[in-house]
Amino acid sequence: MLDDPLSLARLQFAFTAATHYMFVALTLGLAPYILFNQLTAVRKRDGARMRAVRFWGGLYVLNYAMGVLSGLVMELQLALNWSGLSDMFGYAFGAPLAVETMGAFFVESTFLGLWIFGWDRMGRWAHWACFLVVTVTAYASAYWVLVANGFLKWPAGFRIEDGVAVLDSPWSLMGNPSTLMAFGHVATSALLVGGALVCAVSAAHLRRGNDPDRMFHRGVRHGTAVLLLAVMPVVTVGGAQFVLYGQEPPTSGMTYSAEEIAAIESEGASSAVEAAGMAGDGVMMGSWMLICIVAGTAGLVWLMNRLDRWRWVHWMLMALPVLPYAASIGGWTARETERQPWVVRHHLTTADAMSDLSPAMATASFAFFTAAFAVLAAATFWLLVRFARRGPEGGPLAPPRPETEPEDGAQVPARTL
Amino acid sequence: MELVPVLFLTALLVGYFVLAGCDVGLGMLMPYLARTRGERRRAVSAAAPYFLGTEVWLVGAVGVVAGLFPGLKTAVVSDLWPVFAVLTAGWLLRDAGLWLRARTDARAWHAAWDAAIVGGSWTLAVCWGLAAGALLAGGVLSPLALAVAACTVVLFLLRGAAFGAERLVPVPSDAGPAEGPHSALSADAAARLTRVLARAGLAVLAVAVALGALPGALEGGRPLAAGAGAVVVAVALAAMAGTEGPGRSRHASAAAMAVLVPAVGLGAALPVEPVPGAVLVLVSVALAPMVPLMVAGQAALYRMLRRPAPASGFFARVSPAPAGGALPGGSRFRPTGVGGPRAGEPHRT
């Protein structure tokens, strides 16, 4: 299986998309928390809360880097490896992604740069407004990516001319039901990721008795509140998506007749892919149930006012982030495998969408990007854990100290080049 | 009206090469310019804040090509798959290096990510050069393509040198008591390089023009457009070839980079089809409210980064734990009286 360019290209996309999403989910989930924290700090002119913002912001910035790096590869991978998709659906699929890169990511990165380098260099409300822009554009980015992805599952709003899709109605694209429900589901599940991380880091510090300015006392409560608020909407919006299962998209029949569709689906059915989808579904729903239990328990312990003291609660919360991450990967696996063998349901199969890749190109691309992502994701994860454990002192966004190192003048050995 | 999307795409690409040329070029020159640890940190700290703001131009350009000009994308990418794949890899490595370098204090870590920054920057410049050359000459391995690639690499180096001559001047607070006339080593080296590179660039450009003037060298393109581009680059390089330092070379190197995109686009007669109506409506309506934010944000970011690069900060060093927990001077907040560790209270373990 692994010497077939199609399998390699698909696996590469699956690995890189899953890695990308893990960092994106934390970006989406942590941004509102930092925004809310900074708003309180700025309104109350509270230096202690601002130090907490520097701490959570430092973790956010570390995480954002890997999100950007993996996102670059995702964008170029689509252009390089999946040119068949661009040939037939270039405008319909590519236009929302163009809007995402320009209208969302461009602004998000620029204003994040302003937020990082403008600390103490602009008015406090202007600084907070920069992060407001970052948060809003992060969610806008997620929306536009899901416009493209929802189009794949539920193609609507175009007609076929000479084998190429011509966009009829931009509003069908933007209001696509698959898109809207997926966006609601992604937004609420990202809040679970963010809330779980805040709980876990806060609990880890509370366990060691380290709580400068009571920031982790606040953190564990905020995190638990977010979990309790988001855990039911996640499953409600997620479950609503089942209404589309088994239904034909409105443009069905424009490219292939019903019999051809049935033939393609039966021929392209792969038990491995189906098994992966079912496993993803199971992991997602199982994780959700466990998150319910953990969040509910934490809520009860909070009512009993023992969140700062009981060790077993701290250990439970420290283990919690595994669950929403597993649920996210499982959910995406289920979503993407359910559409196979189609890349655009009932119009274009995955095999037809791939570029003309020789086995050498596919193998080289797969080997390099999978290895690079593994190394970078591991490095980022290690750094996140390290700085989370260190606490607010000496974090990535901590204020600079004007010390010079003793060996500043030491020559760098030539072999480091 | 048909011209507007094309002009928008051209502006994005020109913006990318002019702006990102600075940090890519400086990354390429780092081993030559920055020989001590402090200078290395300063070089990374000079380049790194920009890359976040400059690479978004390329990400946007790729998105616009993929979404608004899929025919152009096929024409450019399908033959040049290996070049763009290697470019992506180089881009990934360079960005990873810039972001992760300062996160620990270990020498081996710094050395590894420095190598990624330098290697990634060179990969980017060479791949862009090969792409430009291949589009003009019709094949990656023709002599004209290689000459154009060499010219592009020199333009990147020039942009980096002009940028470094200005940005690598040490901040007065960085200079310790022992620093004397050698305190701006990197900046001086960069300034000297602008003249050397401008002359080298003229020589390589002459070779490229000679090769391009041969019959059949330019693959079905417009030789006049390519020639006009070469003339502009020659004028810019000549303006820099007499003096050294950041003053004139900043603008001249920017002009040379800027003309690269239209010269290749027109010179290679790249296919650009009009954007269909519904797509144009979707993209215009979605982007129109964001354009003021884009412009304002970028302008503010570059104005804020105008000050010379310190050897400290997010991209330069890990901040050590402050003693006593005092707030930095000049903070706009009054210290809170709530909670916090009190002196003498032992931590519960």
Image (spheres, coloured by chain):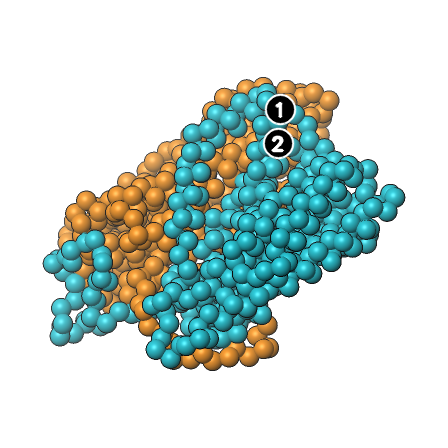
Relative depth, front residue between A85 and A278: A85
Instruction: Residue B42: tell me if it is visible.
Output: yes
Q: Report the disc number at residue B2.
A: 1
Farthest-out residue, front? B242
Q: How crowded is mark 2: few (under 14 residues within 10 Å), some or many (20 or more)?
A: some
| Mark 1 chain | B
| Colour of chain B as rendered | cyan
| Colour of chain A as rendered | orange
Query: Residue, x 86% and y 47% (percent of image)?
Result: B214
Tell me: residue A323, above or below residue B57: below
Task: Give the residue at mark 2.
Answer: B6
Q: Are marks 2 and 1 in contact (CB under 8 Å)?
A: yes
Measured as percent of width and height from the top left, residue A337 is found at 57, 40
Q: Which amino acid does label 1 sit on?
A: Glu
Measured as percent of width and height from the top left, residue B348 is found at 19, 71
Label 1 sits on a secondary structure element that is loop
Q: How crowded is mark 1: few (under 14 residues within 10 Å), some or many (20 or more)?
A: few
How many discs appear? Answer: 2
Q: Which amino acid does label 2 sit on?
A: Val
Side of A234 relative to A295 (left or right): right
Measured as percent of width and height from the top left, residue B90 is found at 61, 57
Query: Residue, x 37% and y 54% (percent of image)?
Result: A117
| Mark 2 chain | B
Q: Mark 2 and mark 1: span between their CA atoms?
A: 8 Å
